[in-house]
Amino acid sequence: MNKVEVLIEALPYIKRFAGKTFVIKYGGSIMESPKSNQAFIEDVALLKLVGINIVIVHGGGKLITDMLTKLGIPIKFKDGQRVTDKKTSEIVEMVLSGKINKDITGELCKHGLNAIGISGRDSRLLRAEKLYAKEGDKKVDIGYVGQITSVNKDLIQDLLNDGYVPVISPVCEDEEGNVYNVNADYVAEAVSSAISAEKLILLSDVKGLYIDINNETTFFSQIKVGEIRRLIKNKTITGGMIPKMECCIKAIEEGTKDVHIIDGRVKHSLLIEVFTNAGSGTMVRW
């Protein structure tokens, strides 16, 4: 009976989202846990099989760091961004597009999905321009790190119409052919905005938005854009949560209906967020 009750609770959500498109950003420590990784693949398979279109954008910072360490290549960060020279850029692309992208695609295919792994370079899917870090009022050159300028939404829509699950590596080019690594959160936001997705779901290493991470009573299960702006302005939201929240705001302003931040380390948190009344993370709405 418990299982039946769960299915009944999920039914209106299945009806509501059938035919809609979700963009899911996948990365962080979730990739390091076989159990979390397997649960994520199973969740995506179920979402797809009940008629929801899925686009996955993945990162892979930890695996990049591991590979650079093995090769003896120095690792530096500025303003939260990896300093990326030419040699580092080649390793980044190898890990993201050659390893992680194909691993995710292969696992989805094992579950009967038509997954296709592509990078931002393929068919000019994503265009980027050079991004500079900031030190006070100064711009700092951090190498081959970019920010998205355009998305080939027709390519994504064609793949979805043909029944594919696009799995996107955040490696992009500019108009001159220079190759850039772009933060996967921002790639997911740009893709979601371009195709006016029903949901952008950011899998994170935290449950969602807290005023105080050590105080469960300060957790937000839902929050509106105006409230986020107020909390940033009065410095209640600080540190690394600011760019993530700004990413959520931009996605909604540019066409995404809802944005969710969930803890990908929790088994089946994706299904819990989408198909239950209580959810599992923080939902950002207009």
Image: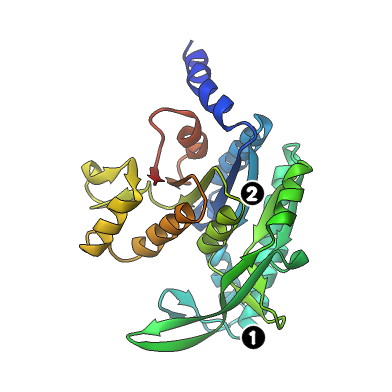
| Residue 141 at x, y percent in the picture | 50, 88
Say which residue appears at 40% left-offset and 61% top-offset: 246
Left-right relation of 214 to 96: left
Q: In this figure, which residue is indicated by the disc labeled 2?
A: 55
**Viewer-proximal residue, 156 or 279?**
156
| Residue 254 at x, y percent in the picture | 50, 56
Residue 76 in view: no
**Viewer-proximal residue, 98 or 286?**
286
Say which residue appears at 58% left-offset and 65% top-offset: 63
Label 2 crowd bin: few (<14), some (14–19), many (20+), radius 10 Å? many
Left-right relation of 256 to 86: left
Q: In this figure, which residue is indicated by the disc labeled 1?
A: 86
C-alpha separation, residue under disc 2 versus residue under disc 1: 29 Å
Q: Amino acid at mark 2?
A: Val
Rendered view: 91 above or below 162: below
Q: Amino acid at mark 1?
A: Lys
